[in-house]
Amino acid sequence: MTQKIIALVDGSIYSESVCHHAAWIAKATGAPVGLIHVLGRRDVSEARDLSGAIRLGARSALMAELADLDAQRAKLMNHQGRAILDDARALVEQAGAQDVTTRLRHGDVVEAISEIEADARVIMVGKRGEAADFAKGHLGSNLERIVRTATKPVFVASRAFRPITSVLVAYDGGRAAMKAVDHIARSPLFTGLAVTVVTVGAETAEVTKGLADAQALLKAAGIAVETRVIPGQPETDLGKLVEAEGFGMVVMGAYGHSRIRSLVIGSSTTEMVRSCKVPVVLMR
């Protein structure tokens, strides 16, 4: 079975960017696109026991009216979800993708991803959700939960789509970073893109060897690659480099090799996703 590009759309200002990036990946890889919209539990009708809240003879009529309002709201939320998916499908197809499906799901977004990610090659999500304009200082809570639990690469779309010609790979020698380099070498998405593998810190013999190994792997795959060591701190200096040199995308591990895996994603990762104005691909 061909693995899909799973793209989450929620009607936020980031959804259009998710759609355009999904189409870009689809055209480069030939993979189908699966558009998913998840109606949370609060968005649909839930059974509520109001028998103690209404008294006297009006209780039966009011209970029936409340139940009818709940049903109408659930129906409207379903219609809205379908409309979001229809619009997203039109955008992806207009951008050149050929094989596009849509699916409306109910429940928790992380649970939904866990059920379908076995068939995914990448999971795409906007940096922030429906409250994006009011949440510029922090990541969307669902994004952090998705990164913590997903086993496939997570593509975090920027606010707007721009053609991508160059990629910065944040490389610290850890397992996730090595997995990211291997993924790039195997994926047709990176054919024709200029890749720069960057380590932040001191230029030690171990760092030099790690970068040479990464470069050799990518060159063997026919990818144009250069390596670089820059001083400073990953949390701040990688983002400055992306901005200064106009990289179109960042690929990095979700956890650094020196960080104990915990319930939060690595601080460098969090800061990169928060501050970068370009897409960030996170590898576990």
Image: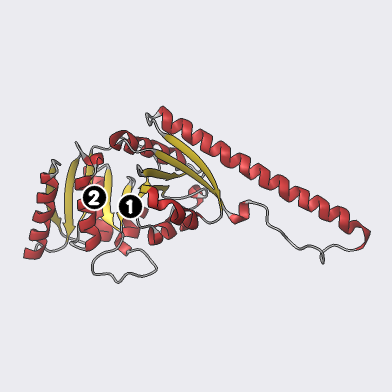
| Residue that carries the numbered disc 2 in the rendered image | 183
Q: Where, quadrant-wise, is the N terminus in this rendering?
A: top left
Label 2 is placed on what type of residue? His
Secondary structure at numbered mark 2: helix
Q: Residue furthest front?
A: 1
Is there a contact, CB below 8 Å, between mark 2 and mark 1?
Answer: yes
240 sits left or right of 105 in the view: left
Q: Residue at x 35, y 63 (%)?
A: 265
From the top left corner, tell me how far across and down residue 47 is, in percent. Answer: 71, 58
Secondary structure at numbered mark 1: loop
**For mark 2, does the 10 Å Cα neighbourhood hold few (<14), some (14 to 19), or many (20 or more) residues?**
some
Q: Can residue 27 be seen in the rendering of this structure?
A: yes
Q: Is residue 39 above or below residue 193?
A: below
**For mark 1, does the 10 Å Cα neighbourhood hold few (<14), some (14 to 19), or many (20 or more) residues?**
many
| Distance from the alpha carbon under mark 2 to that under mark 1 | 9 Å
71 sits left or right of 13 in the view: right
